Image: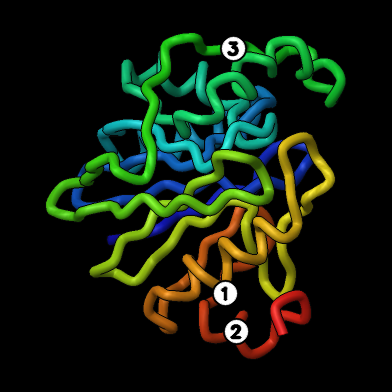
C-alpha cells in the first residue's frame, strides 16, 4: 500500500491518496485552487488510478474543500463523521469567513461512525472515534499496515487546537492517551498538517502529553 501526500490550500492541509494496485481512496481532500485541482487530477490520471471513495476525518473547512470537485469528477461517494453533519452543512455559510468564497458544497455525503465497516481492497479500515479538536473527529487506521490517518488530533510533537466551536482540550487529551495510544507503538501517524510521526515518538517527545 502506497501513500501519496499533497499539501493544499491556505491552511497547508495534508491531503492523502492511499494507493493499491490501480485503485485509490482520497482522505481529506483540501484542494481548493484550480492549480490544486489540476495537480491531484493529473497525478491520478498519470498513474491511471481508479478512485473508489473519499474519507473525511472531520469537517473543518480546510479538510473538505475538494469534496465537490473530486466526488463529481470521479462519481464517487464521500463518507463524513455522522455527528459532524451539522458542522459540515454550516460550512456553506462559514466558508467566506475563512476566505474561501469559491467553496462549492457537496450535499450528497454518507455518514459513518466508529462502528462502520470500511475496507479498501483486501484492507480493513478501523474507524477510531477521537473527539476533542472537533466534536465528531475520527481517524482511519489500517491495522495491518500500521498506518493511521489522524486528521488534526495530533501532530509531530504537538496536538490539534481546541479553541474552535466544539473543541475541548481535556477531551482531546483523553482521545489521544486512552484511545489512539492503545494502538501499536510502531504505527505511523499521518496528520492533517505537517510531517508524519509515530505513536512511539509522540509518547516520548510530545510536550503536551507528558
Mark 2, Cα crowd under 10 Å, few <14 / some 14-19 / many 20+, is some
Which comes before the other along the chain, label 1 or label 2?
A: 1
Considering only vertical position in the picture, is 100 above or below 117?
above
Q: Secondary structure at mark 2?
A: helix
- Where, by quadrant of the figure, is residue 160 drawn? bottom right
Residue closest to the eye, 164 or 45: 164
Above or below: residue 162 compared with residue 170: above
**Residue visible at 59% across and 12% down?**
105
Judged left or right of residue 205, residue 114 is left
Question: Which residue has dot 1 on it?
Answer: 197
Quadrant in the picture for the N terminus: bottom left
* Applied colour scheme: rainbow
Q: Which mark is residue 203?
A: 2
At x 28%, y 52%, the residue is 125
Number of callouts in the render? 3
> Which percent across, then down, holds residue 150?
52, 56
Helix or strand or loop: what does disc 3 sit on? loop
List the residue tagged with mark 3: 105
Q: Earlier in the sequence, mark 3 or mark 1?
A: 3
Residue sitting nearer the eye, 156 or 7: 156
- Given this view, does label 1 or label 2 mark the residue nearer the observer? 2
**From mark 3 to mark 1, how far is it between C-alphas?**
32 Å
The answer to the question of whether label 2 and label 3 lie on touching residues, with beta carbons closer than 8 A, is: no
Q: Are marks 1 and 2 in contact (CB under 8 Å)?
A: no
User: Residue shown at 51%/67% (left/top)?
Assistant: 189
In the rendering, at what x and y percent does residue 96 appear?
82, 16
Query: Which residue sits furthest bottom?
Result: 204
Q: Is residue 112 left or right of residue 161?
A: left
Can you give x and y, in whole percent of width and height, for residue 196 in the image? 57, 69
Amino acid at each position: 500500500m502506497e501513500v501519496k501526500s499533497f499539501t493544499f490550500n491556505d491552511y497547508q492541509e495534508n491531503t492523502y491518496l492511499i494507493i493499491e494496485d490501480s485503485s485509490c481512496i482520497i482522505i481529506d481532500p483540501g484542494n481548493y485552487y484550480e492549480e490544486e485541482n489540476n495537480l491531484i487530477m493529473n497525478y491520478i490520471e498519470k498513474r491511471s488510478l481508479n478512485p473508489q471513495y473519499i474519507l473525511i476525518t472531520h469537517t473543518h473547512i480546510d479538510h473538505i474543500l475538494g469534496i465537490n470537485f473530486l466526488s463529481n469528477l470521479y462519481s464517487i461517494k464521500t463518507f463524513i463523521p455522522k455527528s459532524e453533519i451539522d458542522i459540515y452543512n454550516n460550512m456553506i455559510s462559514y466558508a467566506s469567513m475563512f476566505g474561501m468564497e469559491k467553496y462549492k458544497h457537496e450535499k450528497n455525503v454518507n455518514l459513518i461512525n466508529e462502528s462502520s465497516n470500511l475496507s479498501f481492497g483486501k484492507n480493513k479500515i478501523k474507524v477510531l472515534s477521537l473527539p476533542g479538536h472537533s466534536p465528531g473527529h475520527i481517524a482511519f487506521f489500517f491495522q495491518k499496515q500500521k498506518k493511521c490517518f489522524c486528521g488534526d488530533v495530533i501532530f509531530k510533537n504537538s496536538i490539534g487546537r481546541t479553541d474552535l466551536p466544539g473543541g475541548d482540550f481535556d477531551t482531546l487529551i483523553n482521545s489521544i492517551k486512552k484511545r489512539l495510544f492503545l494502538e501499536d507503538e510502531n504505527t505511523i501517524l499521518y496528520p492533517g498538517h505537517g510531517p508524519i510521526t509515530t505513536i512511539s515518538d509522540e509518547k516520548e517527545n510530545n510536550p503536551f502529553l507528558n
